[in-house]
Image (cartoon, rainbow, N blue to C red):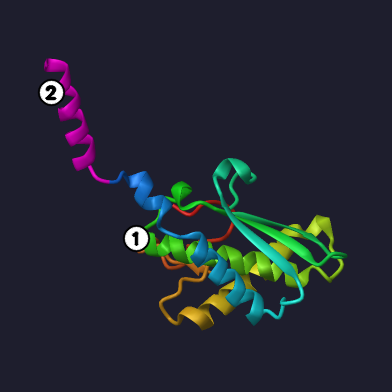
Amino acid sequence: MRLAVFLLFGIVVSLSAGPSVTDAKSKLVSDVQVQSWLKNWQNRLHLEDWTVSVRIVRSTELKPDTLGNLKWDSQAHTAAIKILSPLDYELSAADTSEDMEYTIVHELVHLQLSVLPRDLKKKDVEEEVVNKISDALMGLDKGPAFHARSVPVQKPSAKPSEPEVAGRAGPRQ
């Protein structure tokens, strides 16, 4: 009898606990939303002749300190994008969602530039250009509330002459 009461109590407690924070964060951005962003930005960037897939992945599937990556095949016109899962972000829900969309735009801009010759010694220059183009596109789409990632950001407590640079170098916290 005691065992039955104990089990019943355990079930009631677990049901009343509600969804965990992990469950809530995993549902923050759906696969449907990610596919919608992909289609929208793929059309805007005139990449309709490419077959592009996008997957939400955990940080272990990406290189350290990255938010996404892109692999493409120029001959077949196919590309695969991986973007960081909301579970691995330490941002507000709105900022996480916007950052994931930004990552899709960022990777599609890389794809658009893939027709140009690449100098692997200047990957940082390409990243800077891709960030600036992505910032411009997202700024046009989101309006003045959008926070560009490639421009210096003033810390409220810092001297005006000491900007903090925000970029795509790693997970935003």
Q: Which residue is drawn at 47% across and 79% down?
A: 142
Name the image quarter holding residue 51: bottom right
Q: Distance between the residues labelled 2 and 1?
A: 57 Å
Decide: is 167 above or below 58: below
What type of secondary structure mainly makes up the magenta span? Answer: helix
Front residue of this view, candidates 95 and 130:
95
Q: Residues within 10 Å of mark 1 (few under 14, many from 20)?
A: few
Residue highlighted by disc 1 = 157
Give the residue drawn at x 66%, y 64%. 107
The residue carrying mark 2 is 5
Q: Which residue is drawn at 45% across and 48% down?
A: 87
* Mark 2 secondary-structure assignment: helix
Of 158 and 29, the residue lying toward us: 29
80 in relation to 161, above or below:
above
Residue 70 falls left or right of residue 21: right
Extent of the magenta region = 1-18
Q: Residue 64 carries which label?
A: none
The quarter of the picture where residue 14 lies is top left
